[in-house]
Every structure is written in structure tokens, then in C-alpha cells.
């Protein structure tokens, strides 16, 4: 039994055990149990503004990686006075990858403008985009420390791996949001956002798929495909709502129509996009498995009514006035 099969088997058993024990993924008592339901008291505007947290992440990471400049250099108003990210820098990218990332970066500015123009914006949250933070995330997924330390800005392959970590989470967020939207105009906006985010994710996965058999030196010979499996498994574990994330190669029983192990696009048994709730997304991007406890890429928590509401209902973790130590 190979490692990849074991990873997905363990997730499947975890989901079954939750069902047997009565920990339902339709549980609305998010203060007591992990919630997998997107049914909450929130307006269309609040749901879409929540997505800006991920759009800020992508905009800052892509802009800095491709141009060496952050969002404020291109648009001074979208951040609404929020702090600039910590640790982001120009990446050492080959010309083709740099051009792709640069295009994605400008698209993210457009997404932020589109949301702000329709439903109003939120203040940019503090983002920890340091190489140390990315290394911590990938180390955790693989299960051992990288040597030398993983640096997403060091080369094109590492940057593509880092791109795999978060943008897909935003895609699943849009998929999960659409069923709860009421206003036609907001639905059209989110449909347009989802279309471009899906295209970006497909491009990222294609670039990695072409290099799936390459070894990632920082992890002693782990292949690119294996690393994506580890990262997807970590996101599934943090999200706590079963398999909604798959690497570039899957067991046959998870492949399209159970006929292929290739997995260029992550999709369910009907080849439809997975959806995630705001709670699941926060558990993943915080890296804590708890929507009430910030950390990871959002050390002071995400912004907007939905995200701050979870922080206010949870125990105090010192997110007010928090600081990020960066070396």
C-alpha cells in the first residue's frame, strides 16, 4: 500500500468515524462542534466581503512575487488602511512563470475592485507571507523539517508549490458561497470571480503536473506530486469536513469516473468543484483547525463581519494588537 493511498484511506476512515459518532457535517452548533454547513446568518454582502481576505492574500503574494511591489504600489485605496504584509518579496522566477504570476496578480486587483465597488470593502488583514511561515506550513504537511529550509521565493518550482497552498482554498469558498446567495447581481459577481479563480488554479496545477516527478530537494527526494498530496491532506485535516482537496495524483477510486489516477483538476465523484464554508476556510488559512483561533497566514485574524464574529465568540487568543516576529 503506497503512502498516497494511506493518506486518502485515513481521511476516508476519519469521515466515516465522524458520521458514526454523530458528528454531522450539517451541525450548525459551530461553537461546540466543527461545522460543515454554510447556513449561517449572513447577508450576501458579508459573504462576499469575507472572500476579500483570500483575494488580498493572492494579490499581495502574486504582486510581490512577480514585481517586487505590493498592492499599495498599484492601488492605494483598496487596503482601507490595513497593514502591509510581512515577509513578501520578489521571487526568483523564470520569465514564463513570472509573466503568468504577474497576470494573476493584476487579476486579483480587479477582483478586489469588483467586490469593493459592489458591496463595499474590508480593511486588509495582516498577512504573514514570510518564507519562514511557508516553510512551517510545508514542513507540517510533509511531517519533517526541510533541509535547507523551504523558501518559496528561491525558484520557480518552490513558488509554484507555494501558489498551490492557498488560492485553491478561495476557489472552494466561492463554490460553497453561491448556494446561499440571494441577489442576482451578487450571484453574477461571484460566478465571474469563480470562473477566473478556477482558471488560475488549473494553470497552477498544470505547471506543477508537468513537473510532478521532479524531486523537491528540501524534502530529501519527495516528488512534486507527493508534496501536493501532503498539502491537500493537511488542508482536509484542518478543514475537518472530509475530502475536499486532492493532489495531482489520486487513488483510482478518487479519479474521474474511477478510471484514472491523474488529477489535473480537483473535483468530487461527479467531477464538480468542492465547496467549503467560511469556518472551514478559516481553519485552514489560520493553520489552527479552529475558526476562533487565528494564526498561520493571518496571525491577527481575517477581517469582515463573518471572520471577526468568530473571533469575538471564541476564547481570547491575543489577536488584538498582535505582532509578527520576522527574521
Image (cartoon, rainbow, N blue to C red):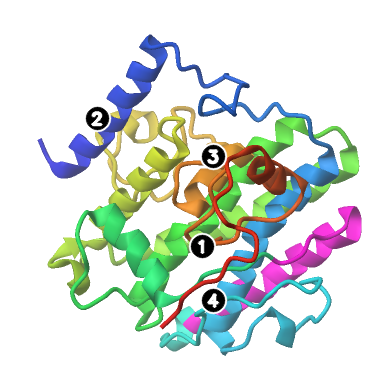
Mark 1 touches mark 4? (CB < 8 Å) = no
Report the residue marked by disc 3.
280
Q: Which residues are magenta?
A: 98-124
Kindly identify which residue carries mark 1.
297
Q: Residue at x 67, y 50 (%)?
A: 194
Q: Quick one: label 3, few (<14), some, or many (20+) residues within 10 Å?
A: many
Which residue is denoted by mark 4 in the rendering?
A: 100
Where residue 312 sits in the image (x, y, percent)? 68, 43
Distance from the alpha carbon under mark 3 to that under mark 4 = 29 Å
- Label 3, secondary structure: give it: helix
- Residue 315 locus on image (x, y percent): 57, 41
Pair 1/2: label in front: 1
Q: Is residue 240 magenta?
A: no
Picture layout, residue 64 above or below residue 246:
below
Out of 290 and 188, give the one closest to the viewer.
Answer: 290
Between 77 and 181, the one lying in front of the other is: 77
Which of the marked residues, 3 or 2, is nearer the chain's N terminus?
Answer: 2
Residue under numbered circle 2: 9
Q: Is the magenta region chiefly helix, strand or loop?
A: helix
Asked whether the residues under the numbered discs 3 and 1 touch, taking CB atoms below 8 Å apart as contact, a structural biologist would say no
| Quadrant assignment, res 327 | bottom left
Q: Are marks 3 and 2 in contact (CB under 8 Å)?
A: no
Q: CA distance from mark 3 to mark 1?
A: 15 Å
- Residue at image position (75%, 52%) is 304
Q: Residues within 10 Å of mark 1 (few under 14, many from 20)?
A: many
**Relative height, residue 19 to residue 249 (above, below):** above
Q: Residue furthest left?
A: 1
* Residue depicted at x 59% and y 49%: 171
Residue 302 spot, x, y in % from top left: 64, 55
- Label 2 sits on a secondary structure element that is helix
Q: Does residue 313 appear in this view?
A: yes
Q: Nearer the viewer, mark 2 or mark 4?
A: 2
Amino acid at each position: 500500500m503506497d503512502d498516497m493511498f494511506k493518506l486518502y484511506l485515513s481521511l476516508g476512515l476519519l469521515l466515516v468515524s465522524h458520521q458514526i459518532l454523530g458528528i454531522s457535517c450539517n451541525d450548525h452548533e459551530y461553537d461546540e462542534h466543527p461545522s460543515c454547513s454554510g447556513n449561517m446568518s449572513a447577508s450576501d454582502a458579508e459573504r462576499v466581503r469575507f472572500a476579500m481576505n483570500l483575494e488580498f492574500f493572492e494579490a499581495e503574494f502574486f504582486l510581490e512575487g512577480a514585481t517586487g511591489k505590493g498592492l499599495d504600489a498599484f492601488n492605494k485605496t483598496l487596503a482601507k488602511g490595513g497593514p502591509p504584509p510581512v515577509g513578501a518579496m520578489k521571487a526568483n522566477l523564470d520569465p514564463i512563470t513570472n509573466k503568468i504570476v504577474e497576470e494573476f496578480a493584476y487579476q486579483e486587483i480587479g477582483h478586489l475592485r469588483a467586490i469593493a465597488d459592489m458591496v463595499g470593502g474590508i480593511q486588509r488583514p495582516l498577512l504573514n507571507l514570510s518564507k519562514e511561515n511557508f516553510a512551517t506550513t510545508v514542513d507540517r504537511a510533509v511531517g519533517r523539517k526541510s533541509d535547507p529550509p523551504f523558501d518559496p521565493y528561491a525558484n520557480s518550482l518552490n513558488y509554484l508549490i507555494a501558489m498551490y497552498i492557498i488560492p485553491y482554498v478561495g476557489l472552494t469558498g466561492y463554490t460553497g458561497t453561491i448556494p446561499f446567495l440571494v441577489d442576482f447581481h451578487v450571484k453574477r459577481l461571484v460566478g465571474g470571480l469563480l470562473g477566473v479563480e478556477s482558471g488560475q488554479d488549473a494553470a497552477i496545477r498544470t505547471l506543477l503536473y508537468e513537473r510532478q516527478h521532479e524531486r523537491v530537494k528540501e524534502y530529501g527526494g519527495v516528488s512534486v506530486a507527493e508534496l501536493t498530496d501532503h498539502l491537500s491532506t493537511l488542508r482536509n485535516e484542518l478543514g475537518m469536513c472530509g475530502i475536499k482537496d486532492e493532489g495531482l495524483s489520486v487513488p483510482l477510486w478518487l479519479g474521474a469516473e474511477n478510471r484514472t489516477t491523474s488529477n489535473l483538476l480537483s473535483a468530487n465523484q461527479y467531477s464538480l468543484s468542492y465547496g467549503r464554508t467560511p469556518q472551514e476556510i478559516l481553519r485552514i488559512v489560520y493553520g489552527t483547525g479552529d475558526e476562533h483561533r487565528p494564526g498561520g497566514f493571518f496571525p491577527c485574524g481575517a477581517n469582515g463581519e463573518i471572520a471577526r464574529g468568530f473571533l469575538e465568540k471564541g476564547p481570547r487568543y491575543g489577536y488584538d494588537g498582535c505582532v509578527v516576529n520576522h527574521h
